[in-house]
Amino acid sequence: MYVYQAQAQLTFFPQRKSGEIGSQFDINYQFKKGTALGGKYGTDIAVNFANWYGFKRKYRVYEDFNTVETKTLDLGEGYYSDFNVDIRKKLSHSWNTALIYIYQDYNTDKIQETEGHVYATTAVWDNLFKIN
C-alpha cells in the first residue's frame, strides 16, 4: 500500500547517510474456483515484503574535506521495512470482501531527519456490496 521513497543523497550533517540497499518480494496466488479454499468464485492471496538499509560506512571529517568509505553489500542501519498480506474473496454475485494486514517499521531519524521511529500495524476488513 505504501511505497518507500529512496534516499539517494550523501550527507555528513546532520545525519550521516551514504546510499542504501533494499529489496522487495511479491508473491501472488489464486486458489481456483471449485477447490476447498477457492470456493465458488476463487480466492486471491498476495504477500509482500520489502526492506531498505543504509550501507555500513566509515566517515572521516576534516576541516577542509570529508570522506566516506562504504562496502557495497554490507548492511548498516535499517531505514524501512514492511510486510503485508492481502486476501480477497468474492462471496456471492453481489458481495466481495478483503482482509489486509500491514506491518511497517519506518526510521524517521534517517529518512526524514527527525527524531523517532514508527512501528505501525494495520488490519483492514473491507466489504463491497452491489445493490441493484
Image (cartoon, grey):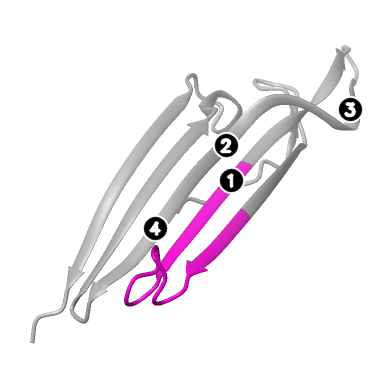
Residue 17, quarter of the rendered image: top right
Mark 2 = which residue? Answer: 81
Task: For marks 1 and 3, give the CA distance.
Answer: 26 Å
Query: What's under tag 4, amino acid-wise?
Result: Ile
Q: Is residue 28 left or right of residue 11?
A: left
Instruction: Give the residue type that dot 2 points to.
Output: Ser
Measured along the vertical axis of the image, is residue 73 above or below residue 95?
A: above
> Where is residue 41 shown, x and y percent of the image?
34, 77
Residues at marks 1 and 3 touching, judged by CB atoms closer than 8 Å:
no
Regarding mark 4 in the picture, which secondary structure is present there?
A: strand
State the mark number for residue 70.
Answer: 3
> How many residues crowd around disc 4 within 10 Å: few (fewer than 14), some, or many (20 or more)?
some
Amino acid at circle 1: Phe
Residue 69, magenta (yes or no): no
Q: Which residue is mark 4?
A: 87
Question: Which residue corresponds to the image point at 50% horizontal and 24% vertical from the top-left?
Answer: 114
What element does badge 1 sit on? strand
Q: Is label 2 or label 3 in front?
A: 2
Contact between labelled residues 4 and 3, with CB atoms less than 8 Å apart: no
Tell which tag, 1 or 3, sits nearer the viewer.
1
Q: Quadrant of the N terminus?
A: bottom left
Residue 122 x %, y %: 34, 40
Tell me which amino acid carries mark 3. Thr
Comes first in the chain, label 1 or label 3: 1
**Bounds of the magenta segment:** 26-50
Name the residue beneath numbered marker 1.
Answer: 49
CA distance for labels 3 and 4: 41 Å
**Callout 1–callout 2 Cβ contact below 8 Å:** yes
Q: CA distance from mark 2 to mark 3?
A: 22 Å
* Distance of label 1 from label 2 (alpha carbons): 8 Å
Q: Is residue 4 visible?
A: no
